[in-house]
């Protein structure tokens, strides 16, 4: 039997598709799968190109696929499944998690999809008995509407700064730190 060699690094880049809101089918939220990676990367990197979030390439997404959930729809025009939203829950320690890479396709914005993704991630925290989840954001009003409150980033443990040190805005961060108390301690 021939050995199948992994195709590491031989994948093509996928750009964010133009989707019109009338082409959207029913939206479903579920754990991410390997086949979602290119759609997630295109969605996230569309925002990253505008310095709104950190870029995420396929390698990172494959390695962290278990952290992600996606919102998908079947496009009416083509019958193809398309990723229209995503978000990740990164566990940092026994009492702290972070919501990362929250992105919603522009055709689905202002329809409650981002809030649904956040609610799914918070529900995952409850299932894990994770008492707190935080995020860094430029859209604090959105996270306030999800029940998050502002807090001082200096209160975060050093483990948080490992990822932050990779950010181009590390020395002049303009993001707001927000916290959600999942469980009463």
Image (spheres, rainbow, N blue to C red):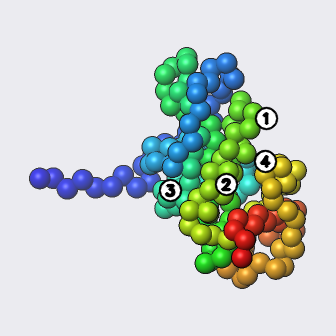
- Of callouts 1 and 4, the N-terminal one: 4
Earlier along the polypeptide chain: callout 2 or callout 1?
A: 2
In space, the residues marked 3 and 2 are separated at their CA atoms by 12 Å
According to the picture, the residue beneath numbered tag 1 turns out to be: 110
Q: Can residue 19 be seen in this view?
A: yes
Identify residue for label 4.
50
- Which quadrant of the rendered structure holds the C terminus? bottom right
Residue visible at 75% across and 33% down in the picture: 111
Q: Mark 4 Cα within 10 Å, few/some/many (few <14, many 20+)?
A: few
Label number found at residue 65: 3
The Cα–Cα distance between marks 1 and 4, rounded to whole angstroms, is 19 Å
Reply above or below: 22 against 175: above
Residue 118 horizontal/vertical position (percent) = 69, 51
Tell me if mark 3 has few (under 14), some (14-19) or many (20+) residues whose alpha carbon lies within 10 angstroms of its own: some
Which residue has dot 2 on it?
101
- SS under mark 4: loop
Seen in the image, is 66 located left or right of residue 118?
left
Dot 3 or dot 2: first in sequence order is 3
Residue at mark 2 to residue at mark 1: CA–CA distance:
18 Å
Q: Position of residue 149 (x, y in %)?
A: 85, 62
Q: Element type at marker 2? A: strand
Q: How far apart are marks 3 and 1 (CA)?
A: 26 Å
Label 1 crowd bin: few (<14), some (14–19), many (20+), radius 10 Å: few
- The answer to whether the residue labelled 4 contacts the one labelled 2, judged by CB atoms less than 8 Å apart, is no
Q: Judge left or right: residue 151 versus residue 4.
A: right
Foreground tag (2 vs 1): 1
User: Nearer the N terminus, badge 3 or badge 1?
Assistant: 3
């Amino acid at each position: 039997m021939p050995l199948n060699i992994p195709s590491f690094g031989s994948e093509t880049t996928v750009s964010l598709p133009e989707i019109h809101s009338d082409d959207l089918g029913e939206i479903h939220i579920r754990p991410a799968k390997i086949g979602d990676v290119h759609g997630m990367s295109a969605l996230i990197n569309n925002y990253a190109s505008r310095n709104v979030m950190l870029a995420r390439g396929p390698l990172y997404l494959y390695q962290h696929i278990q952290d992600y959930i996606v919102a998908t729809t079947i496009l009416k025009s083509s019958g193809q499944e398309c990723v229209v939203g995503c978000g990740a829950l990164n566990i940092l320690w026994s009492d702290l998690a972070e919501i990362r890479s929250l992105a919603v396709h522009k055709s689905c914005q202002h329809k409650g999809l981002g809030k649904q993704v956040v609610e799914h991630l918070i529900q995952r925290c409850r299932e894990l008995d994770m008492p707190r989840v935080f995020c860094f954001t430029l859209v604090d009003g959105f996270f306030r509407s999800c029940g998050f409150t502002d807090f001082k980033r200096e209160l975060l443990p050093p483990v948080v700064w490992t990822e932050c040190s990779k950010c181009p805005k590390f020395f002049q961060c303009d993001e707001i730190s927000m916290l959600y108390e999942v469980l009463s301690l």
